[in-house]
Image (cartoon, rainbow, N blue to C red):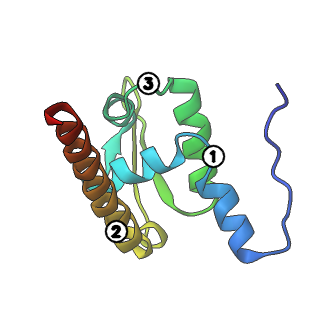
Amino acid sequence: MAKHQDIPTGCAMGGLLETLTKPWTMHILWSLRQHGEMRFGALRRSIDGISSRMLTERLRGLETCNFVYRKYKPTIPPEVSYGPTEKLKEIEKILDQLHDLAIKWDNQKSTAVAEKKTA
């Protein structure tokens, strides 16, 4: 399987979508939206199924795009935390709207399944 490459799209929306639609990216953004600054291990545990390697890769990309910041403390062991930047806070409303839709659609699906069982 070919690795994903960042290819300039020539369109601002294309670039944003390219960043946000990478696997696990929205999970990371949602977790940071919900919990605020988190240490790496806590962030990994909050996202069921993500590997440390994938989380590291996605966080580096999100840091490069200024969606998250990285805070490093040279303790033993080192303490690394990640948190939302102002740029991420600008899309919180959109994330909240997606969350509301997810709940609505999940409730509709549950209602449809219940209706099929009683029919």
Q: Which residue is mark 2?
A: 97
The residue positioned 17% from the left and 38% from the top of the image is 114
Real-space Cα distance between discs 1 and 2?
Answer: 20 Å
Q: Is residue 59 something that shows in the picture?
A: yes
Of the pair 95 and 110, the residue shown nearer to us: 110
Q: Which marked residue is nearer to the observer: mark 1 or mark 2?
A: 2
Real-space Cα distance between discs 2 and 3?
Answer: 24 Å
Q: Is residue 65 above or below residue 80?
A: below
Of the pair 100 and 38, the residue shown nearer to us: 100
Amino acid of disc 2: Gln
Q: Which residue is mark 3?
A: 49
Tell me the SS state at disc 3: loop
Q: Is residue 71 something that shows in the picture?
A: no
Q: Is residue 44 above or below residue 14?
A: above
Amino acid of disc 3: Gly
Where's residue 104, x and y in %? 26, 58
Q: Is residue 1 left or right of residue 14?
A: right
The residue positioned 48% from the left and 50% from the top of the image is 26
Where's residue 40, x and y in %? 40, 35
Of the pair 112 and 49, the residue shown nearer to us: 112
